Image (cartoon, rainbow, N blue to C red):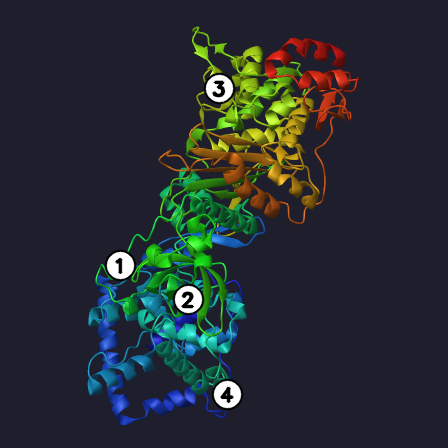
Amino acid sequence: MLTCVLMSSTTNKTLDAETPREPTKKPRVGDKTPFVDRAAGFWVRPRNALLAGLLVIVSGMGTGVAMVYLPDASQVRVLEEYVPSMQVTLYDDQGQPYAELEAAERRKMIPYRDIPEDLRNALLAVEDSRFFWHVGVDPIGVLGAVRDNVTRGFGERGASTITMQLARGLGWSSPEKTVVRKLIEAFYYALQTERYFSKERILELYMNQIFMGHDAYGFGAAAEFYFDDELNDLTLAECALLAGIIQRPNDYYPLDRNEERAIRRRDVVLGRMLVEGYINNEEREQARNEPLDLAERDDRSEELGAYFTEEIRRTLIEDYGTTLYESGLRVYTTLDSRLQAEAEQALDSGLRAVDKTQGWRGSKRNLLEEQIEIAAHTEQRWDRPIERGDYVPAVVLDSRREQARLRVGPYTAVITPEDAAWTAFGRAENVRLERLIQPGDLISVHVTEVHNDGTLSVGLDQEPELEGAVLVFENYSGEIKAEVGGRRFSESEFNRARQAVRQTGSAFKPFVYAAALFHGWTASNLVVDMPQTFEDDSGQPYQPRNHNDAYVGITTITEALARSRNVVAVAVQEQVGAENIIALARDLGITANLQPYLSLALGVVDVSLWQMTRAYAVFANGGVRVEPHRVVSVVDREGRPRSQTQRQSQQVMDADVAFLMSQMLANVIAYTFDRGTQGGSGRRARFLVSELGLPLAGKTGTTDNYSDAWFIGFSPYHTIGVWVGNDTKQPIGPGREGANTALPVWMEVMQAASEGLEPRGFELPVGVVLRTVDARTGLLSSEECGPSVVVAFMEGTDPTRACGVEEARILAMNPYQQAYFVDDIRDRGR
């Protein structure tokens, strides 16, 4: 053994830790006996001396066997290139981690210099108090283990040093507790490790790779998992608790039912630190009395931005292959975590509100029918804190006409007819609770208040069967700030924002009108809105109908778009040409299979929310198409750049045409009359314009059988798309349109996206002017005519004459009569 010590002290060591060695051990409190004197006292005892002699003989034999039969040190030298597996960490746009792509071992690498002294001392005290004195094998520890195993029974005590544990943890030897394994560790791997590596490097490797329970490896990952803290923020008590886990991670991790066991083990570590002189008695008692402050573990299967993260995962797999999961890459994304959470909440709330309009479907499960005792039943959701605003499962205890009693985990609650009024179209007096729910029914409730007496105030709810999707693009950068591909990623990984293609309905109409503007039309061009039949290229008749079969006669394309008039859209397509509309849609980024049918103008074509939202963003961007992206940059575990996303943009539309179109879409929201009861299909969002100080523009979309509801719109900062529908393409319900189904969700998300932004408008291009005109005639607004709209014109194309009594008289006629005068009004506007 002395030879080993001499060899270790004279051999050059490689791969030192990043800081020079520093004394780790404090002087023993109240005991000035040097370590050497205490060691000498150990050896002079007769029984220990006899065992020591035997140990020397066995050690010599073991060394001889090792020199003859074991391989050379090359396996140890691989530590020079050792790179432990690490999970991929995803960061949001504020540089905060929000998700991980899990490796088999969840790890956070911590350099030696950043390991707190209390943590190092706790580890050394309980695992290897003579670490800085031995050469990989601790003679005193081995002797003590031999003595205890002989006198008390085999397996009573181990003698593994930190170096031995490192060798075993790296898979250099078998994990079974056999004499052969101990010899291999003691006389080969441990000695060779100490020969080639400094103590600091060995300790750094050990503290970053040791298993710490659950899927945490290393103290950095353990500190985050158990305490949600960085290592340098840990208290002495927390350091001791982590050090105590190592011996039996599955028994000592401080979660579930292990807390008391973990605390007892922590106190053992604190006792060892006292004995070794790292702390005094006052520090130990203070640490022992410190309450266990564990991180709140949320076992929800739903992670923030799960669909967004999944899209990134697929992209990274394509770029880096299956080794991705152990690469330790740091991926900086475009995600706005706050906005993502708001978007997820807005979609969930919106779907619940729409679902309730379709009536109460009843409970899908009754515990009594399944012969399950109500008092014994438990739900996983009940294990987490229940707060105001949560939707949680509840069990009906009893149900009468005027009230029903519920159990919600540790809470009780009561539902009254008022809490279930939505099941009777808002008429609480018609609600009969005993018919709605029965004892044993497992139902969903919405928590409106949590009381200190163990009761909840709740409302009856039900899980929606509808699905939906939300996308938020930042206009200039193309960064995706939020992406919601459905209600529950855990239930369906199908991303409806990216993968689903659905009929767009009237949300396609802006492309028709944009093509018209591109080909020289103005936003005040007149078309007669009346029932008429068109012929397609094959001579087949096509007769579109307006919503509710309502027709107004002469109108501008601005008013027709705002009020989503179908006949006008088809008439414009017929004049502009379907091929021109398809070409423009392609320029905007629509790659779907568009066919030149007359129904194209009404959105009888399947397109994804992704493509539709990207296309609308071109209007907001002044005609510039910017490619959306989720990843800003990727760096490796050492911080070296691996990739950087550059903004990719292309001018695909003249800026003036884009502005004219944006102004037309702004009237979908801003145009109102009859005290706000009539107007654009998006008029319910008009209050946001003044509230946010931003112009808003967009378009609703609804399919014929109410199976799809859309709203896509933008501000100067963001373009947001929302789709709602059933995966089966079944109708949402009678009257469920984009305006009352998708728009409310869009409004909530736009409000969240615009929080704190400076008021600004769309940039007015040179040569474009704004005029307030009569919505129907396109002439300058006047008191003689009807409601007005603000329209953008190229200079020289704006009207010069106001709408007068004669125009008002014509507009009072029926649509067929008005058709005879449309050319007269056009001429007057020139």
Residue 71: mark: 1
- Up the image or down, 362 lies above or below 455; here it is above
Q: Residues within 10 Å of mark 4 (few under 14, many from 20)?
A: some
Spatial CA distance of label 3 from label 1 is 75 Å
Q: Of marks 2 and 4, which one's residue comes earlier in the chain?
A: 4
Q: Residues within 10 Å of mark 3 (few under 14, many from 20)?
A: many
* Discs 4, 3 touching: Cβ within 8 Å: no
Q: Of marks 3 and 2, which one's residue comes earlier in the chain?
A: 2
Under mark 2, the amino acid is Ala
Q: Tell us which disc is closer to us: 4 or 3.
A: 3
Instruction: Classify the position of the N terminus by image quarter.
Output: bottom left
Residue 280: mark: 4
Under mark 3, the amino acid is Leu
Residue in the foreground of this view, choosing between 635 and 526: 526
Q: Of marks 4 and 1, which one's residue comes earlier in the chain?
A: 1
Under mark 4, the amino acid is Asn
Circle 2 sits in a helix, a strand or a loop, which is it? Answer: strand
Spatial CA distance of label 2 from label 4 is 52 Å
Q: Tell us which disc is closer to us: 3 or 1.
A: 3
Residue shown at 70% from the left, 33% from the top: 762
Determine which residue is flagged by label 2: 413
Q: Tell us which disc is closer to us: 4 or 1.
A: 4
Q: What is the quadrant of residue 632 in the picture?
A: top right
Spatial CA distance of label 3 from label 2 is 53 Å
Residue 600: mark: 3
Where does the image place residue 182, in percent across and percent down from the top left? 25, 71
Where does the image place residue 153, in percent across and percent down from the top left? 19, 83
Residue in the foreground of this view, choosing between 538 and 213: 538
Residue 312: mark: none
Circle 4 sits in a helix, a strand or a loop, which is it? Answer: loop
Q: Is residue 218 left or right of residue 567?
A: left
